[in-house]
Amino acid sequence: MKIFLLFLLWLPLITLSNQNESGSTYREISEVYNLLISYGIRFIYALMILILGTFIAKMITKGFRRALEKRKVEITIANFLSRLVQALLLIFVVLATLSKLGVQTASLVAILGAMSLAVGLSLKSSLSNLASGLLLVVFRPFKIGDHIRIGSYEGTIDEISLLFTEMVSPDNQQITIPNSKFMSDAIINHSSKEL
């Protein structure tokens, strides 16, 4: 950064010493100098937006997470909502940064939307697991620590993520099951409260 600033300060002096009689060299160098100053300032502002925006996004996410914990929201739902809020805030920060750099964000959003559609079609099974994970979080047929049976698998739920659910079998083996299986098979929850 110091070298860049030193270059910007010395550039006019160098150009004045090399100026020809018509002064065209000075004008050309002056235009380049002004362009460098303009883009340099724009880049510094964009960098400030990125750094400050990322910091603010992390602080908002932490505050949101604390609010969920105070309300005693289940850990799976709290994790999911916190990650969702953080991802949305970071997308906003990146779009604001790119906008400050002069990138047309409307066309970028359209391109990203088309790419998301193409990727979505190719990842149909993963999206099925994602949708099933969201349904598991919302309807909560079981929670972390419950002892369940699904199909030929039985064990204690260790973690519920958006794509997979992990459980530990009675013989202490880690089992990872795609969430879509929970929407298609019967779940027997041995830990649920008796009526």
Image (tube, rainbow, N blue to C red):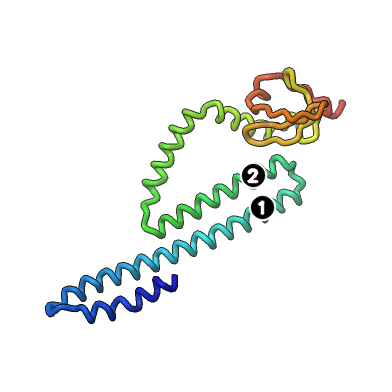
Q: Amino acid at mark 2?
A: Leu
| Residue 81: % across, % down | 64, 44
In the rendered image, the vertical position of residue 77 relative to residue 122, given as above or below? below
The disc at residue 72 is: none
Ranked by sequence position, the earlier of labels 2 and 1 is 1
Q: Residue at x 39, y 68 (%)?
A: 41
In the picture provided, is 176 more to the left or to the right than 45? right
In the picture provided, is 54 more to the left or to the right than 102? right
Name the image quarter holding residue 174.
top right
Say which element carries label 2.
helix
> Looking at the figure, which quarter contains the N terminus?
bottom left
Q: Residues within 10 Å of mark 2 (few under 14, many from 20)?
A: some
Name the image quarter holding residue 166.
top right
| Residue 146: % across, % down | 80, 31
In the picture provided, is 188 more to the left or to the right than 122? right
Name the image quarter holding residue 63.
bottom right
> Looking at the figure, which quarter contains the C terminus?
top right
Distance (Cα) linking label 2 and label 1: 9 Å
Q: Residue at x 77, y 36 (%)?
A: 144
Q: Residue at x 39, y 42 (%)?
A: 110
Q: In terms of depth relative to the viewer, which is nearer, 175 or 188?
A: 175
| Residue 97: % across, % down | 45, 57
In the rendered image, the vertical position of residue 70 relative to residue 39, given as above or below? above
Check whether the beta carbons of the residues at disc 2 and disc 1 lie within 8 A of each other.
yes
Q: Residue at x 60, y 29 (%)?
A: 129
Residue to which mark 1 is pinned:
64
Say which element carries label 1.
helix
In the rendered image, the vertical position of residue 108 relative to residue 129, given as above or below? below
The disc at residue 81 is: 2
| Residue 5: % across, % down | 40, 74
Q: Amino acid at mark 1?
A: Phe
